[in-house]
């Protein structure tokens, strides 16, 4: 058992105990005493950890032992303090790490009080206290607690774990004071203006968190304070900040003003709360300017993998130009229906049959049968229907690429082994063909910019290239045809009158409903949108795209 601790306040402490309350108690010592050696008998001498009592120590015994432990700790008689615990060796090491890590100058314990039986440690009495530590950089205060147990022979001990040093401190963690280590404060992921925090946009919160974990921040300076660090010295959490540093940032390509427009666009009242996703790219360099979505099934702007419908006719036309030598004036009869590989295909309602239609005219009104007839005739040879896939890969960069920052995206797909009716359906973006708004925005950007620029969200990130650039001839043809769609074709109700705009609508069947698509470009950006359950591209995705192009 311990002798009474010599505090220089024996009378006052005795008076407190006589009253029966366990009142305020204060231990204050400078760190001038040695770190080992004690003038009292070790409390844990005779403590038998293998024979613990199931009955908690009395409040008075628990507080007496805790005071002795804290007195030795405050005097930095660490071996003596460790001897008051149930694992002296581990406690002594941890107490030394506490002193060294915090560069401790002095330690004060106040209000040492019993809290009754421990709710966490069976057979223990909880004792709480307040800590005031002068450490490198300033003074840190916090509340702590210990659990006091005793063995069946009546000898008490502090149940040791790292939470004695600080509540919740893990077994492989320690404390550090001074310059806050990397990781103790989070970087801010910002828009291209260097200021706007991306987490303020609902569509970008998860992306910002992912980028923060994976990208390397720049600028900023670390502040000073107290932090939890892991066994490798990396910061886990800042507990106290004495002086604030400048938050490091990860600058992205997002245009803050356009992102705000995109957030409003995907909630346009015309959509009637249907899930929607949109992506806007700078077609000159592939920078993602805005990315927004609604719905409960994740980010459909970059992961909404759906049949793209007639927006795929952009790539189908490019394949007909590059691989079959066709031009916009080549014949492309538009019939009411067409059978290919025993599967019958129809046009969308409102598309009139025109036996004298050209490819450009079929593109403008989005005639399915024209593209199925020409695609199946010119691009499927001896059962090999891989030409559309090859065009998408070689010219439009279709493949597996990362937008950066660890952000996951879903790859588009045009199978090389299409069979049966899928050999024809692929040319109108149906069958097993899938894409995302991200990819379809990139397709429009390739047409407008004259080259594939891989979409990225982090400036300076490595961008994959397409095996061959789109030819000036093919790009010119597509721009002319997409301009016709915007001025007098299926997209005209939304895009008509907008200067320099070209686009392509799409309506894709999926189960018992349709999805609406629209991809377009203007003099600065390329945009694509998908609305799940949209009745048509122009009457769903068209509203989203128009708002982005007009900035409204």
Image: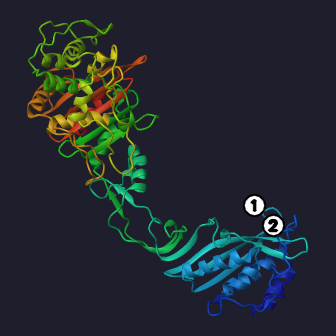
Among the 4 quarters of the image, the one containing residue 185: bottom left
- The x and y percentages for residue 228 are 54, 69
- Residue at horizontal 85%, vertical 71%? 57
Q: Which residue is mark 1?
A: 120
- The x and y percentages for residue 273 are 41, 29
Is 335 above or below relative to 174?
A: above
Query: Under tag 1, what secondary structure?
Result: loop
Report the coloring of the rendering.
rainbow
Q: How many marks?
A: 2
Callouts 1 and 2 close, C-beta under 8 Å: yes
* Quadrant containing the N terminus in the rendered view: bottom right
Query: Under tag 2, what secondary structure?
Result: loop
Nearest the eye: 170 or 542: 170
Is 384 above or below relative to 208?
A: above
- The x and y percentages for residue 86 are 77, 73
Is 356 placed left or right of 303 in the picture?
left
Q: Which residue is mark 2?
A: 124
From where the camera sits, is residue 376 visible? Answer: yes
Among the 4 quarters of the image, the one containing residue 58: bottom right
């Amino acid at each position: 058992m311990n002798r009474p601790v010599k505090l220089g306040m024996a009378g006052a402490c005795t008076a407190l105990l006589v009253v029966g309350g366990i009142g305020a108690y204060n231990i204050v010592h400078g760190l001038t005493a040695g770190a080992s050696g004690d003038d009292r008998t070790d409390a844990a001498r005779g403590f038998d950890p293998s024979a613990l009592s199931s009955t908690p120590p009395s409040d008075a015994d628990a507080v007496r032992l805790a005071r002795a432990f804290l007195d030795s700790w405050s005097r930095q008689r660490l071996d003596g303090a460790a001897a008051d615990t149930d694992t002296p060796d581990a406690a002594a090491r941890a107490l030394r790490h506490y002193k060294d890590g915090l560069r401790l100058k002095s330690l004060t314990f106040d209000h040492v009080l019993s809290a009754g039986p421990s709710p966490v440690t069976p057979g223990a009495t909880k004792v709480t206290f307040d800590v005031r530590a002068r450490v490198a950089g300033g003074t840190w205060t916090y509340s702590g607690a210990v659990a006091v147990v005793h063995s069946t022979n009546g000898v008490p001990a502090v149940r040791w774990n790292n939470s004695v040093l600080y509540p919740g401190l893990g077994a492989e963690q320690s404390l550090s004071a001074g310059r806050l280590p990397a990781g103790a404060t989070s970087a801010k992921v910002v828009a291209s203006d260097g200021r706007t925090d991306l987490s303020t946009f609902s569509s970008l919160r998860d992306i910002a968190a992912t980028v923060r974990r994976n990208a390397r921040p720049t600028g900023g300076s670390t502040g000073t304070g107290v932090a939890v660090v892991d066994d490798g010295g990396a910061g886990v959490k800042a507990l106290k900040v004495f002086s604030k540093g400048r938050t490091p940032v990860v600058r992205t390509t997002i245009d803050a003003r356009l992102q705000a427009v995109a957030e409003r666009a995907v909630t346009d009242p015309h959509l009637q709360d249907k899930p929607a996703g949109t992506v806007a790219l700078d077609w000159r360099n592939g920078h993602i300017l805005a990315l927004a979505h609604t719905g409960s099934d994740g980010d459909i702007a970059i992961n909404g993998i759906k049949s793209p419908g007639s927006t795929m006719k952009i790539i189908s036309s490019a394949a007909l130009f590059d691989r079959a030598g066709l031009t916009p004036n080549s014949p492309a009869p538009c019939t009411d229906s067409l059978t290919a590989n025993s599967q019958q295909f129809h046009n969308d309602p409102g598309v009139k049959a025109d036996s004298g239609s050209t490819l450009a005219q079929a593109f403008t009104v989005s005639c399915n049968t024209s593209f199925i007839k020409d695609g199946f005739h010119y691009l499927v040879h001896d059962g090999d229907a891989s030409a559309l896939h090859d065009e998408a890969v070689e010219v439009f960069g279709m493949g597996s690429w990362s937008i950066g920052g660890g952000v996951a995206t879903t790859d588009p797909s045009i199978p090389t082994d299409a069979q049966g009716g899928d050999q024809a359906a692929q040319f109108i973006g149906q069958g097993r063909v899938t894409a995302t708004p991200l990819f379809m925005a990139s397709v429009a950007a390739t047409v407008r910019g004259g080259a594939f620029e891989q979409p990225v969200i982090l400036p300076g990130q490595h961008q994959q290239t397409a095996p061959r650039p789109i030819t000036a001839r093919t790009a010119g043809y597509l721009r002319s045809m997409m301009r016709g769609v915007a001025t007098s074709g299926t997209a005209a109700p939304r895009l008509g009158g907008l200067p320099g705009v070209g686009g392509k609508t799409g309506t894709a069947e999926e189960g018992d409903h349709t999805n609406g698509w629209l991809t377009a470009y203007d003099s600065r950006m390329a945009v694509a949108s998908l609305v799940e359950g949209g009745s048509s591209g122009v009457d769903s995705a068209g509203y989203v795209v128009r708002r982005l192009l007009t900035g409204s």
